[in-house]
Image (tube, rainbow, N blue to C red):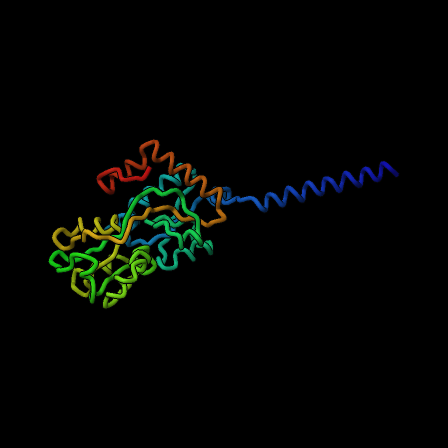
Amino acid sequence: MKKRIRSVLLVLLMLSIICISSGLALAGDDSLERIKEKGKFIVGLDDNFPPMGFRDEKGDIVGFDIDLAKEAARKMGVEVEFKPVEWDGVIFSLKNGTIDVIWNGLTITEERAKQIAFTKPYLDNKQIIVVKKDSDINSKADLAGKTVGLQLGSSSQSALNSEPDVVESLKEVRTYPNNTEALMDLQIGRIDAVVVDEIVGRYYISKKPGVYRILGEDFGKESYGVGVRKEDTSFLAELNKILDEMKADGTAKEISEKWFGDDIVKR
């Protein structure tokens, strides 16, 4: 009888251990393992956001962030797929699993950090005001009664809205699906100014010398990070580790010099 009781207790103990182990496995994060099993991670991006990510004359997606993501995937031992999405819905695309990361000049903000997780910052940036070369606008005060353009859902929109006095003085804030369309409208005179990421704005200006200029005032400094789902902690840790390796081994510096002519990667 005692032997039978001991056997029953042993079976119950083993079942308890199995259940506890299974529970821990379910509670743990297997995001990195899933990425490796899938053999790739999917990057969501605005494919009209040079020099971070855009299409070249052949239609291929290229850019600074594209090269960083490719190198990170290589170091991780997987492939990378680039999936263009509507920028104002990019966080929804991440959270519903359509994409695995947002890697496209994504500004780290408190509002976004409530919804997703970020890697360590890898680039510093600020929101600048671009006008036409011959514009009479020289300060934020001069924007009163003017029409300002920006990308819908961008940090430019948040930065502008953080200064309600400026917003209230404007005639109109016109939103665009991408910065290219906003800057084209500025060039032909449909709007009076564009609020845009400095890195992106300076790239556009360099391609059209004599067309635009940047005001001395801006809407504040910020940093770029790679966005992942909050629950994907092991994948996030691996991305941070690889980004640190790329900074240490000179890979990030090489990519930066290719696109910006200088090493502007944040250490």
Residue at 38 percent of width and 38 percent of height: 243
The C terminus sits in image quarter? top left
Looking at the picture, tell me which residue is in the foreground, 156 or 234: 156
Residue 98: image location, x then y, percent: 44, 54
Looking at the picture, tell me which residue is in the foreground, 170 or 241: 170
Is residue 233 shown left or right of residue 191? right
Quarter occupied by residue 138:
bottom left
Residue 247: image location, x then y, percent: 34, 35
Residue at 34 percent of width and 42 percent of height: 122
The N terminus sits in image quarter? top right
Looking at the picture, tell me which residue is in the foreground, 249 or 215: 215
104 versus 71 height, above or below = below
Residue at 34 percent of width and 47 percent of height: 224
Residue at 23 percent of width and 68 percent of height: 171
| Total numbered circles | 0
Quarter occupied by residue 166:
bottom left
Is residue 132 shown left or right of residue 195? left
98 versus 254 height, above or below = below
- Looking at this rendering, what residue extends furthest in the top direction? 249
Residue 44: image location, x then y, percent: 38, 52
Residue 77: image location, x then y, percent: 43, 38
Could one spot residue 55 in this view of the protein?
A: no
